[in-house]
Image: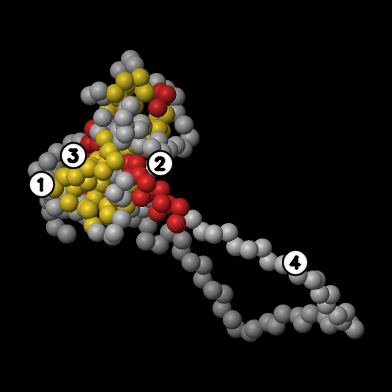
Amino acid sequence: MQLSSVIGKPVLSPTGENYGYVTDARLSRDFSRISCLICADGEEEEFYVPLRAVLSCEDAVIAGKARIAAPTGVLSPIGKRAFSHTGESLGAVSDVLLGEGSEAVLILVKEGVRTTAPVSCAGVEEHAVIYPDAAAKALAAKRNQRPRAAADPPRKKRTPPKRAQEEPAAPPQETENEAPMPEKNVRENVFPLDRTNLLGRRVKRSVFDEYGAPVALAGERITPAVLARARRCNRLLQLTVNTLTSQF
């Protein structure tokens, strides 16, 4: 199963109650399975569904009522830039083919061309680095380990000389006509943004991610899947602006 196929799906109870929709997912360390689903309800409030609560996942996610306080697992690599072990740009991670009994695979896209790389040959943190094989990745990880510093020899404690008489501390000096400093307004530059009324609206100008892929095209109606895609690409603010007005 491809990870992106889960994003945007509605989350329903076994009796048909609508809990919300999937906005993202956390994975196991080897990317073989989903650890938990990150979801949002109708008011865009996040909640986290553990894998044990997922009963089925086809056109919709059927889940029980079990929730966790914080997401577990590793972050999704979708959208991260990818490089070869020599530093050559390989584009970005566009999707993950989960293991499900076999090795997980990263799907990379560069200038419209798709390539793949096994997760065992990739190091994924802030970016993805692709190695020729798993042995090369393990060697690079070993070289990256910092050697332990030699222990410093114990130092002798020095006893400071006793002072003949402690000098009294000087009293604080008062400054006349000194105006008190105004308190900083901690609510400066607060820009409240309500996105609960965007569902069903049409986009007036197209929104693209940092790689030029469309997040929402002009004339497209905003659905939960569009909101999830905009959230994942950090384009929610731009989507809101391009929905409410056609002028920047």
The residue that appears at 14% across and 38% down in the rendered structure is 221
How would you rate the neighbour count of disc 3 (Cα within 10 Å): few for under 14, some for 14-19, many for 20 or more? some
Residue under the point 26% across and 30% down: 1
Q: In this view, does 161 lie above or below 185?
A: below
Q: Distance between the residues labelled 2 and 3?
A: 29 Å
Q: Which of the pair 148/20 is nearer the observer? A: 148
In the rendered view, tell whether residue 103 sits above or below residue 122: above
The residue indicated by pointer 3 is: 222
On-image quarter of the C terminus:
bottom left
Q: Name the residue under label 4.
A: 154
Question: Which image quarter: residue 3?
Answer: top left
Q: How crowded is mark 1: few (under 14 residues within 10 Å), some or many (20 or more)?
A: some
Determine whether label 1 and label 2 are within 8 Å by CB.
Answer: no
The span from disc 4 to disc 2 (Cα, nearest Å) is: 42 Å
For marks 2 and 3 on the same chain, the one whose residue lies earlier in the sequence: 2
Left or right: 120, with 183 as reference point: left
Q: Name the residue under label 1.
A: 218
Where does label 2 land, which residue? 74
